[in-house]
Amino acid sequence: MGIIERIKEIEAEMARTQKNKATEYHLGQLKAKIAKLRTQLLEPPKGSSAGGDGFEVTKFGHGRVALIGFPSVGKSTLLTMLTGTHSEAASYEFTTLTCIPGIIHYNDTKIQLLDLPGIIEGASEGKGRGRQVIAVAKSSDLVLMVLDASKSEGHRQILTRELESVGLRLNKRPPQIYFKKKKTGGISFNSTLPLTHVDEKLCYQILHEYKIHNAEVLFREDATVDDLIDVIEGNRKYIKCVYVYNKIDVIGIDDVDKLARRPNSVVISCNLKLNLDRLLSKMWEEMGLVRVYTKPQGQQPDFSDPVVLSADRGGCTVEDFCNHIHRNLIKDVKYVLVWGTSARHYPQHCGLGHVLQDEDVVQIVKKKEKEEGGRGRFKSHSTAPARISDRQKKAPLKT
């Protein structure tokens, strides 16, 4: 029996099982088995060469955004409108067969936008090159899920289920669970608050399913069984997602208003070029890019070429800013002067741990090189020769 058949068999068993206090341990074990099988499904087959026919493109710019959706929802048209890059669009499905990159120039930054082929139900099992599409989405900073506003709500749920089955968690944060494997000592289970979804017995059973018999587990929040399995697997990617409803020109105004009020959702029309500016501002807000301008000593700030930082790519502290300019610069920093919304007064003397905000101005003051041996009468050694015989004799005075 193959992996996909085993997954379907376990899912059928979970559907048959009633959910109550008596069966929660059994359901937890089944969830752990499915997670293990799905991880095996993502691994390349043994004996195959490492190189495959994927369509990963080189990272470029200050951020990466992936367009994901069903075929013929307007992804290629949206890429052409936002970036100017031509992506073939036609009235039939699967017009785009490979990854087409484009660059968005917005707020003095460059954001890479990837037009991916449409994915279908069953993409997590490899249907329609679904695995390659989802692998590219995993390397992105933001996912734009393009949906057809005239279709049913089931499309969004199908796409979310396909992405979650391969380890992508949309608009979620990592669970506050500390987990560490040990060599000896058994399983140590602790929590900082009362737990309602998981108890010690269920945690032991899930860990034994993974053949882990020595570990330390600490719950810092009331997490579920799925959160515990995600932490044990350790290969989950938590990524932000914006739901983009296209083709709003073919539905009524009440439906448009209902879609626009949903969380993390933007309504647009590529045909009539409606609300594209709102989509760009929502992308900027979700990516959390921070522009920092440099100011040389005694000169005006340079507002033409900012240093772009983000929490997902390194961090937004002064130390990250210095490392972005040059990795050896941090050794020579004496202090930093900051102007902007992150400063309490202008300018503020800051250390390396100060968190910068968007459109801050930073001036780095470097340490001065110390002169060896002190200065003036505090010199530790003279420039005279060490031996008396090496000294130059003064010329005799003229009489």
Image: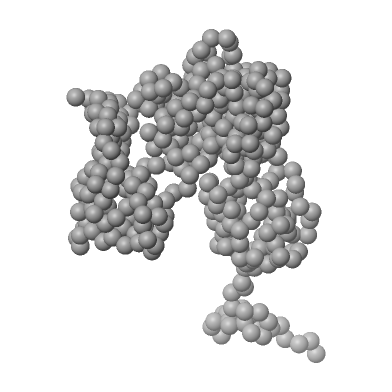
* Left or right: 13 in relation to 316: left
* Left or right: 114 in relation to 159: right
Q: How is the image coloured?
A: one colour
Residue at 19% over, 24% down = 1
Percent position of residue 203, x then y: 27, 52
Of 325 and 186, nearer the camera is 186
Residue at 44% over, 49% down = 174
Depicted 355 relative to depicted 384: above or below: above
Percent position of residue 338, x then y: 70, 60
Of 294 and 239, nearer the camera is 239
* Left or right: 334 in relation to 211: right
Number of callouts? 0
* Left or right: 55 in relation to 307: left
Percent position of residue 232, x then y: 32, 48
Q: Which quadrant is the C terminus positioned in?
A: bottom right
Of 26 and 398, nearer the camera is 26
Quadrant in the picture for residue 235: top left
Quadrant in the picture for residue 387: bottom right
Depicted 249 relative to depicted 136: above or below: above
Depicted 121 relative to depicted 328: above or below: above
Q: Return the residue found at the far bottom.
A: 399
Quadrant in the picture for residue 216: bottom left
Does any portion of residue 100 appear in the rendered image? no
Residue at 57% over, 22% down = 148
